[in-house]
Image: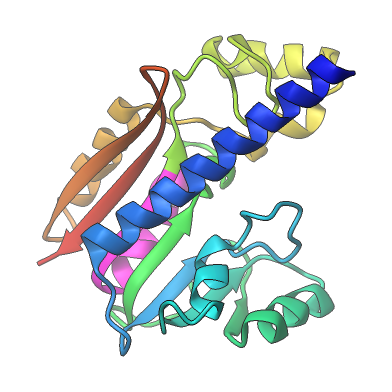
Amino acid sequence: MFKFNIFKKLQYNLHYKNRIEKLNIFINFVKPLPNEIILDVGIASKEFHHFDNILEKINKSNKYNYKIIGLSIEKNIKNLSQIKDKYNILCVQYNGKDFPFKDSSIDIVYSNAVIEHVGNFERQLFFLSEMLRIAKRCVFFTTPNKYFPIELHTKIPFIHFFPKNISDKIYNFLGKGWATGDYMNLLSKKDILLFLQYLENLYDFHYKIIPQKFLGFIVTFSVIIFKK
């Protein structure tokens, strides 16, 4: 039990440290201004950890004064209303497809570890395209590195290295069926670059990909896309 608790504590510290590092990258590189609107795509309607909705938590602490809108596929209006009231922000519900905003209507579009959950390559590309479409100044998104040895959602090593049809069968066998199908499509840096290559035909932008590391391994990528 003692070893198990130590392992859980290490996992929590890794997640928390990683989340804080990503937030610092967002603040230091994007440099959002108080009068700019930030859309948080995929805001958590239920908080299971202290680091969930960390942007909203930092904002509420009065260290910053960001104007935040939360975008969610949450169907339970009560859950979303609780987040709205907790952080005094506007929350918008949508169907997970077209974003309910006009072109270039949001100053900064922010999304933390959501793109790996929206479906296959085509749906991920559409998701990123929608973020770019509505962004006026920039898009900031993060995603776990497909080639980090431990899969961060299941906490199981190496299975995610297999082709998806095989890894899904193994997760089902291990009782982790929730991690299969559209729920999890992990990305490598090569995948991210391929998305950006496609989108360069539609939008004029420049970008920066910043890796976060643990013990020399890349855990996650933070991607900043500045529209020109």
Residue at the image point whose x is 71% and y is 86% from the top: 85
Residue 98 spot, x, y in % from top left: 49, 68
Residue at the image point whose x is 27% and y is 40% from the top: 210
Residue 44 spot, x, y in % from top left: 66, 62
Q: Which residues are magenta?
A: 122-142
Q: Residue furthest front?
A: 2
Asked if residue 151 can be seen in this view, the reply is yes
Secondary structure mostly seen in magenta is helix
Q: Residue furthest right?
A: 1
| Image quadrant where residue 90 sits | bottom right
Residue at the image point whose x is 60% and y is 36% from the top: 13
Q: Is residue 175 left or right of residue 208?
A: right
| Image quadrant where residue 64 sits | bottom left
| Image quadrant where residue 137 sits | bottom left
Coloring basis for residues = rainbow
Q: Which quadrant is the N terminus positioned in?
A: top right
The front one of 67 and 181 is 67
Q: Is residue 183 left or right of residue 214?
A: right
The front one of 120 and 162 is 162
Residue 65 spot, x, y in % from top left: 41, 84
Residue 86 spot, x, y in % from top left: 70, 81
Asked if residue 100 can be seen in this view, the reply is no
The front one of 219 and 111 is 219
Circle count: 0
Residue 166, placed above or below residue 195: above
Q: Which quadrant is the C terminus positioned in?
A: bottom left
Residue at the image point whose x is 30% and y is 47% from the top: 223
Judge whether residue 176 is colored magenta: no
